[in-house]
Image (cartoon, helix red, strand yellow):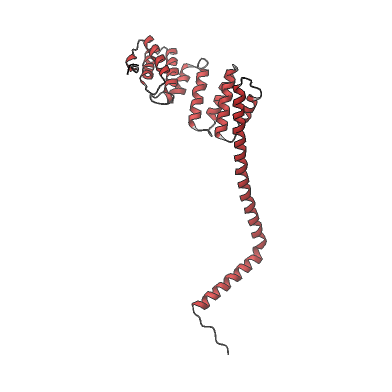
Amino acid sequence: MAQPPEINETFLREVDENLRRDRVRDFAKKHGTSLIAAVVLFLAASGGAIWWQYHQKQHSEQQVEQLTETFRVIGTGNMGDAPKQLDAMSNSGSKAIRASAMFTRAAVAIQQNDTKLAIAKYREIVADDGLPQPYRDIALIRQTALEFDQIPAQEVIARLQPFVKPGGPWFATAGEMTALALIKQGKKDEAGRLFAAIVKDNEAPNSARERALQIAGSLGVDASAALPNPAQ
């Protein structure tokens, strides 16, 4: 009569391995077709993702080259199809391409005396929440500059209020337009103080500070002490 095998660690390991092989074989028989299909789908999806990334990179590079060529054409003074190409690139999935195309399209519109189109382009940039905030900020400032004589003074003040902060990157431009809007409202004292603040802002361009100094003086505010001494 055969004796049962000795139950030790070696025997248990062999049984465990046999059970695993049987389970794998049974699983393969039962789910082999669906497993192969799943692997094929995974490989297709992975390959598709890699192809899409490569395609996007190539497309972006082509758009950069196209944008560069459009800039070159604009620089010659012969617009040709440049406006049409800029309009097409304004829908690019690349934020940098899209922003550059829209800003350039607005600049071309201004050059062609089409203020209405330029305003519309800046408005598009402001509304594009996919673009970085600094792009949208400068677009709002440029839009407001073009619309300054078309909208109420209070709307100018409300739009630019976030930028009227000494030391800020847009303080000189936004502050100057705000001060002019205050003058429209008859608030000359407030306007004069704001022009004086621009003169005192060391981050503001010298041309803006000198202009603000002159206007502040005309409003009865002496801000000359804030200007740098050329002899120093």
Quadrant hosting residue 4:
bottom right
Please tell me which residue is depicted at 38% across the width and 25% down the height of the picture: 167
Residue 215, given in percent of the width and then of the height, sits at 40, 12
Residue 46, given in percent of the width and then of the height, sits at 61, 50
In this rendered view, identify the residue nearer to me: 87 or 37: 87
In this image, 161 relative to 29: left or right?
left
In this rendered view, identify the residue nearer to me: 134 or 205: 205
Please tell me which residue is depicted at 65% across the width and 65% down the height of the picture: 30
Q: Taking the image as drawn, is residue 114 in sight?
A: no
| Residue that lies at the very extreme toward the front in this rendered image | 231
> Which quadrant would the C terminus be assigned to in this image?
top left
Please tell me which residue is depicted at 41% across the width and 14% down the height of the picture: 211
Quadrant hosting residue 195:
top left
In this rendered view, identify the residue nearer to me: 22 or 190: 22
In this image, 192 relative to 9: left or right?
left
Q: Taking the image as drawn, is residue 199 in sight?
A: yes
Q: How many marks overall?
A: 0
Residue 11, given in percent of the width and then of the height, sits at 52, 78
Quadrant hosting residue 171:
top left
In the displayed structure, 218 sits above or below 95; it is: above
| Residue that lies at the very extreme toward the right in this rendered image | 33
Residue 105, given in percent of the width and then of the height, sits at 59, 24
> Which quadrant would the N terminus be assigned to in this image?
bottom right
